[in-house]
Image (cartoon, rainbow, N blue to C red):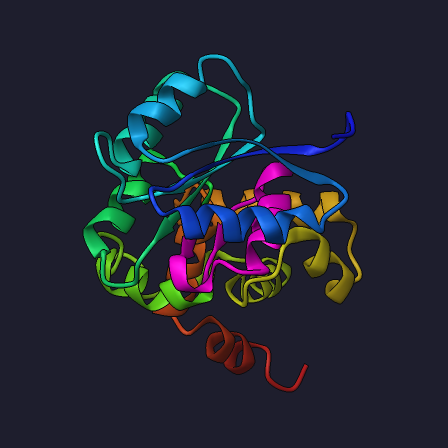
Amino acid sequence: MKKEDIKVFIADDHDIIRQGLKRIISFEEDISVIKEAENGEEALELLKSCKPDVIVLDCNMPFKNGIEVLRCIKAANQDTKVIMLTVENDRKTIHSAIGIGADGYMLKDSAGTEIVSAIRLVYKGEKYIDKSLIGVLFSDIKSESKKTKSILDILSKRELEVLIKMSNGLGNKEIGEQLYLAEKTVKNYATSLFRKINVYDRVQATIIALQNSVEDYYNIKYKGE
């Protein structure tokens, strides 16, 4: 393991999942798996003696589930980023993870090579959401639904463009490349639009974008320019 490696901890009660993720990660020069656990209690115990950059955490584990472990990690104000592994029909758990502040959300049956992209994104401080989960989140988060009828009106043209790219699953670097902006500039636009639409991360921003058909809104508003 090189000093600059992204240190990863995998916690999942299924050995086949852990071994599969380890194998995928083993091909990456900048990512190393430093620990693994098969239940929530073991994960928390091991976290006392190691400091991973990213923990890939199964939502449903024995003794302590992923939500309990996530809550403990965030309550301790640890710098470790957390990617939750879940199943599509576990709506309540996904919603709970969002409320606690997980950094990434992935479906277990799609946690293949995508995990590498997710690890790198959350390590840099971005949020990651499996595209297959967007529909679930869309239907679950209703608190903003009555407030967002015209919420896109308060965003600038460039903020809308960033939001569109974000809702399509692109990270800040990719957005910058497509919009010919510096990555830092994209981050500034993201921070501004989060504040304006009253969300705290790209997951909720994506939901707002989908609820309000942001691409159609943009095309209508700026048609002919």
Residue that appears at 31% across and 30% down: 40
**Residue 177 relative to residue 190: left or right:** right
Q: Is residue 92 left or right of residue 193?
A: left
Is residue 45 positioned above or below 108 on the image? above
Above or below: residue 3 compared with residue 165: above
- Point out residue 113 in the picture as x, y percentages from the top left corner: 59, 60
What residue do we see at 29% from left, 64% from top? 136
- What residue lies at 56% left-to-right and 26% top-to-bottom? 52
Quadrant of the rendered image containing residue 107: bottom left
Is residue 106 magenta-colored?
Answer: yes
- Given residues 102 and 22, the one toward you in this image is 22
Quick one: quadrant of the C terminus?
bottom right
Q: Can residue 184 be seen in this view?
A: yes
Spot occupied by residue 112 in the image (x, y as percentages of width and height): 53, 60
Q: Is residue 39 magenta?
A: no
State the extent of the magenta-drawn residues as a range.
105-130
Q: Taking the image as drawn, is residue 146 in sight?
A: no
Could you say where residue 33 lies in the image, as x and y percent from the top left? Answer: 60, 36
Q: Where is residue 106 in the image (x, y as percent from the top left)?
A: 43, 55
Image quarter of residue 144? bottom left
Q: Give the mark count.
A: 0
In the image, 196: left or right of 148?
right
Using the image as rendered, state which of residue 145 and residue 134 is in the foreground. 134
Which residue does the image show at 52% across and 53% down from the upper left? 20
Q: Which residue lies furthest to the top in this view?
A: 49
Indicate whether 221 appears above or below 66.
Answer: below
**Quarter of the N terminus within the rendering:** top right
Q: Is residue 183 left or right of residue 162?
A: right
Establish if 82 lies above or below 86. Answer: above
Given residues 165 and 112, the one toward you in this image is 112
